[in-house]
């Protein structure tokens, strides 16, 4: 294998659940690694910034066990072996992803960090050696998929592709809100993405900010060792009883889909589903830990000023405030509309039809990522064929 940069038909960026799903479907459609070029077979490569398999699962905190994740959908075509419930997700899932990549022979090249994706600027005709036709390069809006190339600049050289599947997740883009006085705080501030283990907070006063699943899970475990915890959220959290059925799931996904189709920034699927009561959370509630306060109004050197004017001491502020889609490397494509969102049609970016976003917005769950990878590949195959035939 020679992972040297080259021209391929499709570059997939990111080897988490979404990127591997796209890779699986490309392989099924007959796409091969550029170094294994077989006749006229179209080529693809997966560029991943990690040192090894597993996507963001490599970095989840150790106390996130297979028993405490929300439910992980298998990668397409290979069942997740039954790991013990006590297995840390940051070991069990990378091991599964490693086996998946190896057994399916997926052309993942790592560590390769994509710095920028640009439109091939030249207006000169580009020769497409795969399709054997020459066609005009330039703006995607004019030519559609297949016209010209997207240039993928990385820390390991420059690739070029007729289509790009972006599957870069959110983990590398933690969201930190800004509050007055933040810079004066004498204690420690960290984000969920930096969280290691509860023992680090033994004896401390900890303010946990955020209303998502991570926030309540971490609040629960920190409260068992801390001197005290304060939980603040912007909105009143909504807890739900019982399982989240398929219909409710579809409804939640549809609502996020509607947002991105309208060009609005996505909200997480969890933001529209609410929090599910678990035995651990019921126990935390019984211990009096799940007492939610409205967001504090400012941060002071030794604590936070609450909305009612009272003061809470804090040694630590844990920002469990979520993540945003990691799309920094797509900035040269100027995809954002005036509302700050990216207008989508399914997985396809309306302003750049050669680009698909998978694991984005409505597909930011393991099952959504699987489907998005499949849908993106179906469209890319159709678009490349249409162009080759034109
Ligand atoms: P990731 O797994 O983040 O993969 C993205 C990959 O792209 C990474 O390897 C990253 O290094 C790489 N990358 C990023 N930028 C670049 C770049 N510029 N160049 C090259 N590579 C790059 N979902 C569920 O369905 N069930 C759960 O139980 C569940 N639990 C979760 C728990 C936590 C704490 C969090 C934060 C999320 C959870 N999710 C869960 C949502 C989960 O993130 C998604 O389901 C899914 O794992 C995301 O897959 P992905 O492929 O989109 O992203």
Image (cartoon, rainbow, N blue to C red):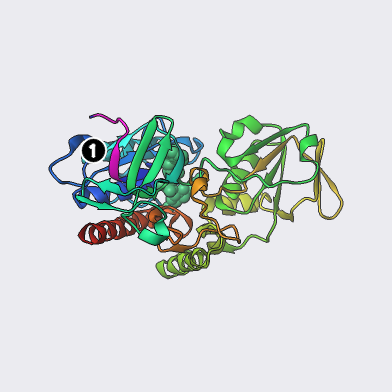
Main SS of residues in magenta:
loop
Q: Is residue 185 left or right of residue 110?
A: right
For the record, the magenta segment spans 2-9
Q: Residue at x 42, y 55 (%)?
A: 139
Residue 103 horizontal/vertical position (percent): 22, 38
Residue 372 colored in magenta in the image: no
Nearer to the camera, 291 or 388 = 388
Q: Is residue 339 left or right of residue 387?
A: right
**Residue 302: which quarter of the image?**
top right
**How many numbered markers are drawn?**
1
Q: Residue at x 46, y 69 (%)?
A: 251
- Characterize the local packing of mark 1: few (<14), some (14-19) or many (20 or more) Cα atoms within 10 angstroms: many
Nearer to the camera, 153 or 223 = 153
- Residue 3 in view: yes
Q: Eyeballing the image, is 250 above or below 32? A: below
Residue 217 horizontal/vertical position (percent): 57, 47
Residue 209 horizontal/vertical position (percent): 67, 47
Q: Quadrant of the N terminus?
A: top left
- Residue 65 in view: no
Label 1 sits on residue: 34
Q: Quadrant of the C terminus?
A: bottom left
Residue 7 colored in magenta in the image: yes
Q: Eyeballing the image, is 232 above or below 60? A: below
Q: Is residue 268 left or right of residue 99?
A: right
Nearer to the camera, 142 or 265 = 142
Residue 179 horizontal/vertical position (percent): 75, 46
Q: What secondary structure is marked by label 1? A: helix
Q: Residue at x 18, y 36 (%)?
A: 36
Ligand 1 rendered quadrant: top left
């Amino acid at each position: 294998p020679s992972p040297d940069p080259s021209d391929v038909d499709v570059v997939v960026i990111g080897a988490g659940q979404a990127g591997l799903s796209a890779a699986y479907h490309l392989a099924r459609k007959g796409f091969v690694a550029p170094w294994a070029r077989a006749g006229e077979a179209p080529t693809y490569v997966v560029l991943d910034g990690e040192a090894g398999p597993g996507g963001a699962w490599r970095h989840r905190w150790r106390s996130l066990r297979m028993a405490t994740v929300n439910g992980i959908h298998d990668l397409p075509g290979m069942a997740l072996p039954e790991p013990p419930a006590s297995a840390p997700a940051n070991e069990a899932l990378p091991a599964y992803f490693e086996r998946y990549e190896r057994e399916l022979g997926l052309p993942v090249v790592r560590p390769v960090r994509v710095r920028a994706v640009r439109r091939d600027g030249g207006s000169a005709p580009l020769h497409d050696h795969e399709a054997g036709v020459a066609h005009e390069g330039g703006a995607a809006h004019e030519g559609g998929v297949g016209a010209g190339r997207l240039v993928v600049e990385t820390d390991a050289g420059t690739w070029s592709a007729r289509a790009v599947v972006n599957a870069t997740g959110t983990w590398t883009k933690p969201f930190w809100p800004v509050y007055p006085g933040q810079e004066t705080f004498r204690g420690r501030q960290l984000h969920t993405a930096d969280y290691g283990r509860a023992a680090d907070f033994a004896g401390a006063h900890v303010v946990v900010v955020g209303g998502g699943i991570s926030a309540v899970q971490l609040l629960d475990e920190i409260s068992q060792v801390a001197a005290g915890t304060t939980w603040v959220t912007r909105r009143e959290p909504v807890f739900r009883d019982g399982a989240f059925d398929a219909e409710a799931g579809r409804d939640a996904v549809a609502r996020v889909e509607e947002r991105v189709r309208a060009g609005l920034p996505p909200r997480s699927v969890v933001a529209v589903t609410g929090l599910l009561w678990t035995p651990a959370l019921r126990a935390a509630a019984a211990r009096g830990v799940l007492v939610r306060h409205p967001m504090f109004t400012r941060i002071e050197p030794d604590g936070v000023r609450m909305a009612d004017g009272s003061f809470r001491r804090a040694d630590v502020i844990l920002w469990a405030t979520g993540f945003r889609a990691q799309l920094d490397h797509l900035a040269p494509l100027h995809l954002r509309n005036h509302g700050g969102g990216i207008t989508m049609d399914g997985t396809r970016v309306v302003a750049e039809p050669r680009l698909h976003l998978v694991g984005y917005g409505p597909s930011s769950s393991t099952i959504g990522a699987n489907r998005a990878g499949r849908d993106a590949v179906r469209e890319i195959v159709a678009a490349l064929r249409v162009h080759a035939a034109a």
